[in-house]
Image (tube, grey):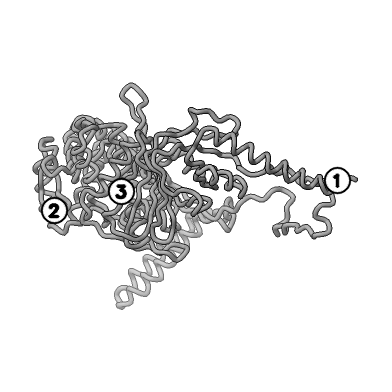
Amino acid sequence: MRAELEGAIEAVKNVSFKKKMNGQTFSTVALCASILLFFESELRPKQKMQAPVLVLKDSLKRESGNNVHHGNIQASKAVADIIRTTLGPRSMLKMLLDAAGGIVVTNDGNAILRELDLAHPAAKSMIELSRTQDEEVGDGTTSVIVLAGEMLHVAEAFIEKNYHPTVICRAYNKALEDAIAVLDKIAMTVDVKDRATMLGLVKSCIGTKFTGQFGDLIADLAIDATTTVGVDLGQGLREVDIKKYIKIEKVPGGRLEDSKVLKGVMFNKDVVAPGKMRRKILNPRIILLDCPLEYKKGENQTNAELLREEDWSVLLKMEEEYIENLCVQILKFKPDLIITEKGLSDLACHYFSKAGVSAIRRLRKTDNNRIAKACGAIIVNRPDELQESDVGTGAGLFEVKKIGDEFFAFIVECKDPKACTVLLRGASKDLLNEVERNLQDAMSVARNIIKNPKLVPGGGATELTVSAMLKQKSSSIEGIEKWPYEAAAIGFEAIPRTLAQNCGVNVIRTMTALQGKHSNGENTWIGIDGNTGEIADMKERKIWDSYSVKAQAFKTAIEAACMLLRIDDIVSGIKKKQAPGTGQAPSKPKIEEEGDADNEQMIPE
C-alpha cells in the first residue's frame, strides 16, 4: 500500500513540473499538498476515541496549579491594599456600615477586617492573621497584613519562573529565623518602673491611632490601668489580666479630657431603696454575696394544701422569719454595703434600711469579681458561712452619682486595688468606641512591656535593619534558595515604604536614602518620622515598638505567606453531608399542641 502511495506522490510531482511552463503552478501545488495531507492521514494508525472520566460532581468547581497561586496572591494583595493606608501616624480612617446599620469609624486593622464579608478563601485566612495578632499581642494588626501581602507579592515572580513553592517556603523560614535573631540583637531592655520610658513607648503605639491627637491622655490611662492590675508571680514575672480586671465604662457626654482611671470600680446600678439608704459612705465595710436574699422557692413546682386558715399565717410567718434570720446573720458583721448577684426581697430591703445598710442587687458576676479584687472582700455563697475575713474594708468611699440620665455606683479610693475601671467620656458613641479600641491596644502594649521589657526601634527602622542584614547574609547562601531569601529581605521594606507613602513624601528618594544609611548594618535607629516624613533618629524622637509585637508580626506574616503558597488546589461547592436515611427535604420541627404538651410527664395521682 505504502509503495503505491509513494508512486502516486511522485506522479503528482511530475505533473506540477510540466504544468509550470503554462503559468499554472499554484493550483497544481495546492492540489499536490492536499493529496499529500490526505495520504499522510491515511497512513497514520487510527486511535480509539476515549470517553472523558468524571471524578468530581458537576456542582464542584476545581482550580489547580498556577491559577490558584496567582488567585491567592491577588486576593491577599487586595486585602493588604484595603488597610495599607491605615498604617502610621498620618493614616486615614475607614468608615464601615455594619450589619445592624450602625457605622464603625476606625483605622485599627483588625476592627476594619472584622467587619468585612469576603468571598475568597485566601482573603479570609488573611483576616484571621490580624485577629491572631490582636488576641496575642493587641497591636501591629495592620503591619501583619501589609507584611504578609508583600511577602506573597515578591513570591509571585518565582512562581512564574516555575520555582517549587516548597523551595520558596524553605527560604522564607530561613529568613524568618535570621530576622528574629537580628531583632534579638538590636532590642534594648527597658526599666518597667520608669514611667517616662513607658509613656514614650505607649505613645508611639497610639501615635498611629485616632487618639494620637490627644497627647498623653490615653497613654496615661493605659499605663495607670495596667500597673494597677499587675500581679507578681515571683521570679520577676508579672501577670496582667486586662480582660477580667479592667472594665472600660463608656459614658457619652462631657469631654474626652474628663476620662480617668478610677482607683476602684464603678458599675451601672443604684441602691435598692433610694431615699431610705445612704448613697455616700466613707470607708465602707462591704459584703459580697452570690445568693438570693429572699424566701427560697422549691426547686420544682410545689403544691401545699392548707386545711386551716391559721396555717396560712404560720406559713407567711415562717417565710418572714427565714428572711429575718438571713438578715440578722449578715448584720452581725456590721456592714455598710451589701451587694448580691441575685434578688433581694422587699422585706430584706426593709431590715437593711432599718439598720442603715445600703444594698445593691442583681449585679453581674464579672463586676462582682472586680469589686472583690478592688476592696479585698471575698464573695460568699451562703450567709451562714460569713466570717470577718470575708468583709471588704479596702475601699475608701462608696458613692452613687448621676451621670447623664443614669445612676452609677462608685467604689473608689481603694488601698491596693487589683482591679479597676476606666471611665471614658466623649462627645458621641462612635468616638467612644474608637477611643475604647485604641485604649485596648495601648493597654496590650503596656502589658507586653511589663511581661517582656524589650524595645526595638519604630518608624520602619527595625524592618530596614532586618532587610539590610538579610541582604548581606543572602550572598553566603548556596543554591536555588538564595533568590527567594533575598526577595524576603526586600519584602520587609514594605513597612517603611508604606509609612513614607502615607506621609506624602517622595517615596523613592526617601527609601533610597534609608537603604543607603542601613546598607552595611549600621545606623539601626534611623527610620522615618511618620508625622513629617523626615529621616530621623528614632531614639531622639522616642519612636519605639515593643519587641513582642514585632516578633509576633514577623512570625505570623511569614508563616501565613508560606501556608498560602503551599495551596495548589481549591475545590469549592462542597455540600454538607446528610445523615444516611434522611430525605432531601429537611423535616419540619414538631410543634406540641397544648393538649399533648405534658401528657408523658403527668404525675399519677
Q: Which mark is residue 260?
A: 3
Q: Nearer the viewer, mark 2 or mark 1?
A: 1
Q: Amino acid at mark 2?
A: Gly
The Cα–Cα distance between marks 2 and 3, rounded to whole angstroms, is 33 Å
Q: At x 48% / y 27%, what residue is drawn?
A: 389
Question: Of helix, strand and loop, which one carries label 2?
Answer: loop
Using the image as rendered, state which of residue 23 and residue 365 is in the foreground.
365
Q: Is residue 565 something that shows in the picture? A: no
The Cα–Cα distance between marks 2 and 1, rounded to whole angstroms, is 81 Å
Using the image as rendered, state which of residue 363 and residue 521 is in the foreground.
363
Q: At x 18% / y 35%, what residue is drawn?
A: 469
Question: Of helix, strand and loop, which one carries label 3?
Answer: strand
Q: At x 56% / y 36%, what residue is drawn?
A: 330
| Whole-percent x, y for residue 141 in the image | 33, 47
Q: Amino acid at mark 1?
A: Ile
| Whole-percent x, y for residue 133 in the image | 36, 43
Q: Amino acid at mark 3?
A: Lys
Q: Which residue is mark 2?
A: 533
Few, some or many residues within 10 Å of mark 2 (<14, 14–19, 20+)? many
Q: Is residue 290 something that shows in the picture? A: yes
Q: Nearer the viewer, mark 2 or mark 3?
A: 3
Place residue 138 in its image quadrant: top left
Residue found at the far top of this picture:
235
Which sits earlier in the primary sequence, circle 2 or circle 3?
Answer: 3
Question: Of helix, strand and loop, which one carries label 1?
Answer: loop
| Whole-percent x, y for residue 114 in the image | 41, 54
Few, some or many residues within 10 Å of mark 1 (<14, 14–19, 20+)? few
Q: Which residue is mark 1?
A: 603
- Tell me if 177 is positioned left or right of 376 in this view: left
